[in-house]
Each structure stands twice: as C-alpha cells, then as structure tokens.
Image (cartoon, rainbow, N blue to C red):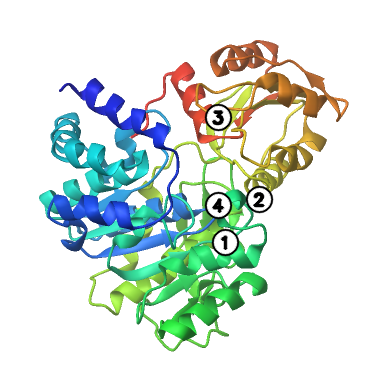
Amino acid sequence: MTYGEAVKFLYDLEGFGIKLGLDNVTRLLGRVGDPHLAFPAIHIAGTNGKGSTAAMLGSTLTAAGYKVGLYTSPHLVDFRERICIGGKKIPKARVVQYVEMIKPAVIELKCTFFESVTALGFLYFAEQGIDLAVVEVGMGGRLDATNVVKPLLTIITPIDYDHSEHLGRDLISIAREKGGIIKKGVELVTDGSQPQTADVLKEICRQVQAPFVDSSSTWDLGVPRFYRRFTSFYPKRSNTTPTPLRGFGKFPLVKLTLPGTHQMANVRLVLSACERLKFKHFNIKIDHIIEGLKKVRWPGRMQLVGENPLILLDVAHNPGGIKALRENLIQLFSYNKLILVFGVLKHKDYRGMIREMAPICDHVIPVEPQRKGALPSTELAREFSKCTLKVSPFKGVAKGFSYALGLASKDDLVCVTGSHFTVGEALQVIGIKCP
C-alpha cells in the first residue's frame, strides 16, 4: 500500500457518515492493543477555540521539554496535520503502517473515517512513547470517538450553536453533550463567563465530583494590545478568584502569535490548564509559557498572508466564529473595500453567518469547496443577493479566490472564510504549506 492508497482508504470511509458513540471505536482500539491507555491526555471540547487552545497548550508543553502528541481536526492542506508530535507531522510511512494494521478491523466493524483516524493517531502516540497527548474532540464530546481517552485534565472552550442536528437545538443541550467529556474526579477548566452553559457544566461536575475551574475569573490579562499578526498582554492572577492555588509568579509582557480579540479567552484557558498541571507535578515555568505562546503556529486563524491588498484567511464556520471575525476586521484593519470569498458546507447555519458578515462587505465571491456536502455557490449567491451586495459566484475556490485578488486594489482587504475546506484550498492557491 502506498501513502496515497492509505489516505484514499480512509477518505472512502466517509461514505459511512457520522456515527456518534463509543462502541465501535472501543472495539477497534481493542483489536490493536488499546493504545489510548498508554498515555495520559488533556481532552478539549467546545464550539469555537478548541483547536487554538490545543495548539497553544501543545506548544507550551513542548517548550517545557515534554514529548507532546497533538490530535486535532480537520486539517487544512495535509491529512498529517491532524496527528503531530512536538510540532512535527506523522511520517507518511507510519500512516501506511497503521492503516494496514487497522484495515481488516475497520472493514469488519464498518468504522467511520473519524473513528479510524482516531485509532491511527493513538497508535502513533503509543508507539512513540509520548509524555502527554492534547486531544481535540471532533464533534460534541459525550459520544465523540476521542472520549475513550483517560484524561488528567479536561477543557471546554466557549460553547455556541454548531452541529445542532447532532448536538441539540439549544445551548443547554449542546452544553450537556460537550460536558460529556467530564470524568469523575478530573478537573474541568472552562470559561465560566457564559452563565447558561456554565451552570450546566457545574452541575455535571457536581454529579461526578470533578473540580470546576473558571478561567475567566482566575486570570486577568490587563489591557491587551491587538495587532494584525500578534497580541501582547501582561497576565496576572485575578484578585477575585476563589481558587487558592498560585502556581506562577509575576509575568513579563507576553506575545501571542495568534491575533484576534477572541484568543484571549483561549489564553486564559491555557494559563489555568498550565497552573493545574503544575500542581500535578509537571515542570512548567513562566518562561515555557512565554516561549510556547510566542512560537505557536496555527494556520487559518486570522492569518494574514498578503499586503497591498490585505489577504486574510480564517476558518470561522458558524455564526459565533463569523461574529468574532467581523469584530476583529473592524478593530484591527483599515481598508477601502472588503471583498469576501465565502464557501460553506450545506449543514452549517450559513444564513446566520451571512447575517453577521454581509453588513461590512462590499463585494462577495461565493465559492464551492471540493468537499462532499459543500453548499453550491449559486445558492449562496441567492442568499447574499438579498443583502443588495455585489455578488460574483464561482464553483471552485481557486477560481473565485483568483478573481477576488484580481478585483482588489492595493487598499482593499480580501477575506477568505466559511469553512476549513475553503481556507485549505486558498492556502494551496497561494502555495503556503501548513507546519
């Protein structure tokens, strides 16, 4: 089997769709020696920000000298982005090795793409003898294939509407599904600034006797300064926090290479997680946090890839993410016209995203990513036309993006968003590789 054949085998499994539940993945992992039991994990769920939080935490723990596995999804350009150790992607030869290993069981059990890739990632982590895995939930939490890990810490990022057809139509239902990663006696670090969802998570913690850590009341970042390519701030322990632990002293100025006002909630989660890990005898110092946040790379998140015109890529794919993008565009950028390249999947709340973004756009280029379930660009065009905007649909992302670049003057901003898949194809047009 070649690498191309191995990846094709995995992609072909997408025909089985999404099957929430742990029985299949548990049986699959059992067939290959239960690799998920070979390492401790930090398990991260949430609606927006879980990938950025995972990347920051992985970078910080790597800076502290630990061998860290990072499991995230989806990828932007290269399938191997999903499975990394110390910032390096899984080798192609290992992908082939593990696909050949799991293939008979995958076929017999009719495993999904995500179940199979989860098993592949955990096999790699176990074989490499990692110290710790940072594992991002694929969708939801309670019935997600990653929920077989044995966490020493769980993290839940801010909760919003997404995947409602699977997780529930209201925030309380969605919070219950996300809260399904909380384990008996295992600390939960979360942003408690959303009372409605925080109350749900607190109740789950009470039921399973898991300590509840509110990062929003634990850490104060002062008055952060936001720039196009980074953010700087002075972290300090909040005077109002009820938590007595103080694992770190005084911080100097910290520079985060991920721009955006929305990243501050994720930074507080990372700081709280590092503090809890420190009291679990992990040797994490202030210098490690500074280095980790400075060196973290997470493409497609408010990523500025061009000047004159400005070219920005962001994977926002639900109304909450688009709202954060809109607010950052207004706060951080100065431009003449905003040209939006927008492509989404059918099951997403694209009308909600359009309502958030349309008011600040001058010209919209609806596109259709090369992905099963992509919304036709003509349908997107009809929705945007209701907003009395200039609309120029293209079937392919490459053609639409190229058209937008030709349309833009040096004082304009071209923004590509709506889906990981749309941004991934735009990155390929530019020729930027993901680390």
Q: Which mark is residue 158?
A: 1
Is tag 1's residue or tag 3's residue first in the polypeptide sequence?
Answer: 1
Q: Which mark is residue 166?
A: 4
| Image quarter hosting the N terminus | top left
Q: CA distance from mark 4 to mark 2?
A: 18 Å
For this view, does 187 lie left or right of residue 10? right
Amino acid type at circle 2 is Gly
Q: CA distance from mark 4 to mark 3?
A: 16 Å
Secondary element type, mark 1: loop
Amino acid type at circle 1 is Pro
Is tag 2's residue or tag 1's residue first in the polypeptide sequence?
Answer: 1
The residue that disc 3 covers is 373
> At 62% across and 57% down in the image, what residue appears?
160
> At 58% across and 68% down in the image, what residue appears?
222
Q: How far from the left and from the top, in percent, is residue 433?
A: 37, 26
The residue that disc 2 covers is 320
Choose top left, top right, bottom left or bottom right for residue 277.
bottom left
